[in-house]
Amino acid sequence: MADTTLSPELLAAIRSMEVRGVDHLPVVAAFCNAIHLQDIVNGFVDTRMDVKPGAIVQAMVLDTLSGRSPLYHLESFMEEQDSELLLGEKHAAHNFSDTNIGRALDAIFAAGSSNMLTEIAISACKTFHINCSHLSFDTTSISVWGEYANYDKSDDAPADDGTPRAPCVTYGHSKDHNPDLKQVMAELLCVERGVPIFGRCIDGNASDKTNNNKMLTKISSLMAKHGLGQGAFTYVADSALVTEPNLELLSSTPFVTRLPGVYRECDRVVGEAVDAGKWVELGTLSELPSPVSRPCSDYRVAESHVTLYGMKYRAVIVHSDSHDRRMQKRLEKAVNASRQNLEKQLKKQECEFFCQADAEKAAEALRKRSDHMHALDVEVIQTEANKRGRPPKNGNIQTRPKYTLKTTIRKKEEGVKREEERAGCFVLLTNIPLAGDGAMDAKSLFLAYKGQYGVENNFAFLKDPLIVNDMFLKKAERIDVLGIILILSLLIWRLIERSMRNHLANTGGTLVGLNQQLTKRPTAYAMSTKFRGLQIMLVQGTRMLARDLSDDVTAYLEALGLTMEVFTTPGYACKPVLKERS
């Protein structure tokens, strides 16, 4: 047997060696460090805890983005982590017990959780040179489990008087289709199609129309912190924005929204645009080519104006060749209803006459009942009918003329095509002029509105069961702070994606995404899969990778503005990747 005796020094080094699985978490920590997350939280929250609240918040962000489900028992998560590498200081796992987490959440709530988020977002925008000129706002519902009897009624305290108030946990309109569960609402204000710069939890029965109004009352002061004055930013929101009080608040703020179909002006301008047919082609606006199975939509626009509450606004009618499914179903229902209505009228109509004039009059009346989708073709047919009375014994039977209406329901192809074209239209409402100071053409307006989809994608992130299960905390105050931490996690996730895409836009290169396909728009999730299984060894205070990095991981590190130091140096911060101006 070969002699495998090791030197005492080497044996001691091996016995003291620690091996930790890190995956993509050092990347997340590097982005947290770049925006000074811990420093801002520690400066914002006053507490005498042994472990600083900034470390707890960063640990919860790391836990959230690790993909672990559900988000609780942080202590067990930290037992497996290199806390010094990820947090900059070494912490014992028991410092992240449920008791300490609860105390930290309470302290953050008392200090003002949404204000803390705002300060971190300001730091992120400055560090990564984020353009805040287009703001997208939206809300969603988040279900909770439990009665929350002490938090299901509003205390009627002003929400914006500077005093933190816990959200009302109650029943409301569930956007998740869970009306049996109580809920809170979450609101997000995002820039650059998905980067959150403000958010908070609000009452579970809050109205979107009211939420927009409250946001508009403070939007100027919020954006002033980002260095943008009145009129220097555009507010984008969904159709719930269109109310008289909201439009009054927007008198000096550029905005883009969708005009609800319940307004007669919407139906009018769509009909006029379809009848005129004077469309301006925009073509496909997708940033990347789509597969053959899912072709890109083609868009075209037309300009008009509407009058709402005594004020004149610009209206941009947008037509998409890929009709909304709901609108298609509505169209099919309207076509069927049109035919059924005519069939019902025919059943009530007398179709036999013994006077030609009466028959012709009835036929003309039926023809006039045609609508824009179906025509009633009516033909008067003359036949002979026996006269009344007993026929004579000898001679021919006497007859008299009888007139019958033969009806056919014919589909008007032009009318149905017109309705199909109308079904593919929606109207953008704005106070931004077409010419002059601050002008935007129709294409720019539409692209600004499309940024709203980035907010909706963020809601999918916040509700992903791999990120966090339905909120289950015992106190509404802690639900509020947990919501803020989830938004912070989302902010880091979006910064990661933004850096990678900026790098590829600058270099014209690609990265290996999911399913080994090359992509110019990699996702943060795709990045996380490439780093899966990475381990570091800690030997006598020195960190080193357990094995060499693959070419894919090396390419991702470069795109992220990182070096191999991210795996070996505590407190390491990424270098912001900025998009070069063309």
Image (spheres, helix red, strand yellow):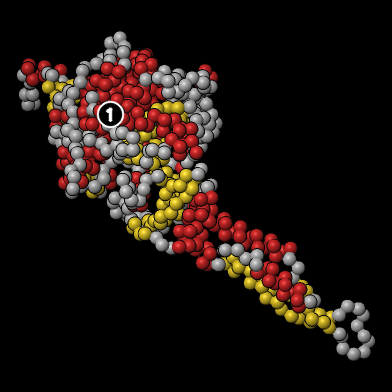
As drawn, which residue projects farthest toward the right? 393
227 versus 316 height, above or below:
above
Viewer-closest of 214 and 326:
214
Viewer-closest of 108 and 149:
108
Query: Is 104 on the left or on the right of 475, as rendered?
Result: left
Using the rendered image of the protein, determine whether residue 482 is visible from the camera's viewpoint.
yes
The amino acid pointed to by label 1 is Ile
Please state the horizontal and vertical placement of residue 257, each as a whole percent of the image: 42, 44
Local secondary structure at mark 1:
helix
**Image quadrant of residue 320?**
bottom left
User: According to the image, label 1 marks what residue?
Assistant: 122
Please state the horizontal and vertical placement of residue 439, each as a whole percent of the image: 32, 47
Please state the horizontal and vertical placement of residue 302, each as a whole percent of the image: 40, 56
As drawn, which residue projects farthest toward the top? 48
Viewer-closest of 295 and 373:
373
Query: Is 549 on the left or on the right of 139, as rendered?
Result: left
- Residue located at (79% from left, 76% from top): 355
